[in-house]
Amino acid sequence: MGLLDFFRGLFGGSKRNEDRRFQNRPRVKRGTQVLIIDDSTTVVTMLRRMLEQNGYEPLEAFDAESGIQMAKENLPRLIFLDIVLPGMNGFAALRALRREPLTAEIPIIMMSGNEQATEHFWAQKIGADDFMKKPFSRPEVFARVDRLLGVTKE
């Protein structure tokens, strides 16, 4: 019996968790910018931590107007955009981002705590690449990010 097996027996660790640590993980170029536009500091903080842990550089905006400006100035690889925002709402921001030549091709994930069919429909209809219901999980976030950015496993 090896030392790892000994500790696994003591603490109830599973081989499955150990194996997961050694699996190939998606790789992204360190510093890849992702913009988060949401008025909830909780949501922004959660996404920021998740993204930083995976090597992304999160940019943050708490309203649509400053988010649009940040997108034009920084040209992030991906945008998380809340639907309900103070001032300009997420749908209007999405339209503005799609009309702006600099940001028209940036993948956008719309977010809402109220997943209604109409929100999802309009998000898709006016050019969102994906829709994510709040609250969300880490695997859900990165499944969407990896798919939209074409992140591959090494």
Image (cartoon, rainbow, N blue to C red):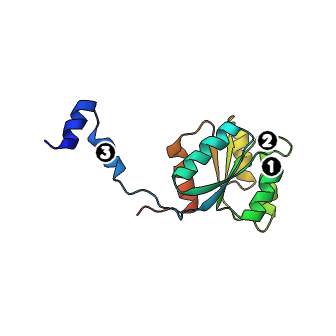
User: Residue at the front extreme?
Assistant: 3
Q: Amino acid at mark 3?
A: Glu
Q: Give the SS element for disc 1.
A: helix
User: What residue is rendered at 76% in x and 58% in y?
Assistant: 70
The answer for how far apart the CA atoms under marks 3 and 2 are is 42 Å
Which residue occupies 77% across, 40% down? 84
Identity, as a three-letter code, of the amino acid under mark 1? Ala
Mark closer to the chain start, 1 or 3:
3
Pointers 1 and 2 in contact (C-beta within 8 Å)? yes
| Left or right relative to 11: residue 69 | right
The quadrant the N terminus occupies is top left
Q: Position of residue 66 (x, y in %)?
A: 81, 52
Q: Badge 2, how many Cα within 10 Å: few under 14, some, many 20+?
A: some
Q: Which residue is mark 3?
A: 18
Q: Is residue 38 left or right of residue 46?
A: right
Nearest the eye: 63 or 131? 63
Residue 104 appears anywhere in the view: no
> Residue at coordinates 60% horizontally, 62% vertically from top-left?
32
The residue identified by callout 2 is 85
Residue pictured at 57% horizontal, 54% vertical: 145
Mark 2: amino acid? Leu
Residue behind mark 1: 64
